Amino acid sequence: METNALKDLLYGGLIELMKNRKYFHDSSLPKYSSWTEEGLESVKEYITLLTPQICEVELAKLDKHAKEMVLKHLKGEET
């Protein structure tokens, strides 16, 4: 999965949770909006579910960068 897809999942999921009054109390003044206890638990579970995918994406980016550096070094290019 790509980084942008994960960002969309995270943002979209939070927005959907915020639309549910069971999880989020919305106020016309944003500083008074807040998560319910059940909402906080749902956010925690959601983040916990996405974290392994985020770790995979970050590891893949690191691996790709390392391979690019090795190829540049083998070609005699500056890194």
Image (cartoon, grey):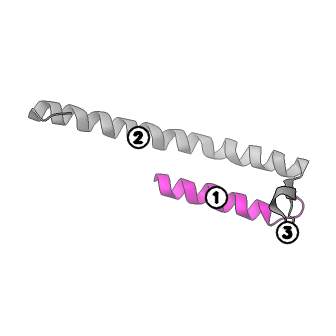
Distance from label 3 to label 1 (Cα)? 20 Å
**Does the residue at mark 2 contact the one at mark 1 (Cβ under 8 Å)?**
no
Q: Which of the pair 48/27 is nearer the observer? A: 27
Q: Where 54 sits versus 1, above or below? A: above
The residue at 32%/38% (across/down) is 65
Determine the main secondary structure of the stretch shown in magenta: helix
What residue type is disc 3 on?
Ser
Density class for disc 3 (Cα within 10 Å; few <14, some 14-19, many ≥20) is few
Choose mark 3 or mark 1, whichever is in front.
3
Work out how far the residue at label 2 is from the one at label 1, CA to CA, in angstroms: 22 Å
Give the residue at mark 1.
11
Q: Residue at x 49, y 57 (%)?
A: 4
| Residue 40 pos. (x, y %) | 82, 47
- Residue sitting at 79 percent across and 61 percent down? 18
From where the camera sits, is residue 23 visible? no
Circle 2 is placed at which residue position? 60
Using the rendered image of the protein, determine whether residue 65 is visible from the camera's viewpoint: yes
- The earlier-in-sequence mark between 3 and 2 is 3
Q: Which residues are magenta?
A: 1-22
Q: Earlier in the sequence, mark 3 or mark 1?
A: 1
**Which residue type does callout 1 highlight?**
Tyr
Q: Which residue is mark 3?
A: 28
Q: Nearer the viewer, mark 2 or mark 1?
A: 1
- Residue 54 % position (x, y): 54, 43
Residue type highlighted by circle 2? Ala
Q: Secondary structure at mark 2?
A: helix
Q: Which of marks 1 and 2 precedes in the sequence?
A: 1
Q: Say how many tags the image has.
A: 3
Quadrant housing residue 14? bottom right
The secondary element bearing badge 3 is classed as loop
Residue 11 magenta-highlighted: yes
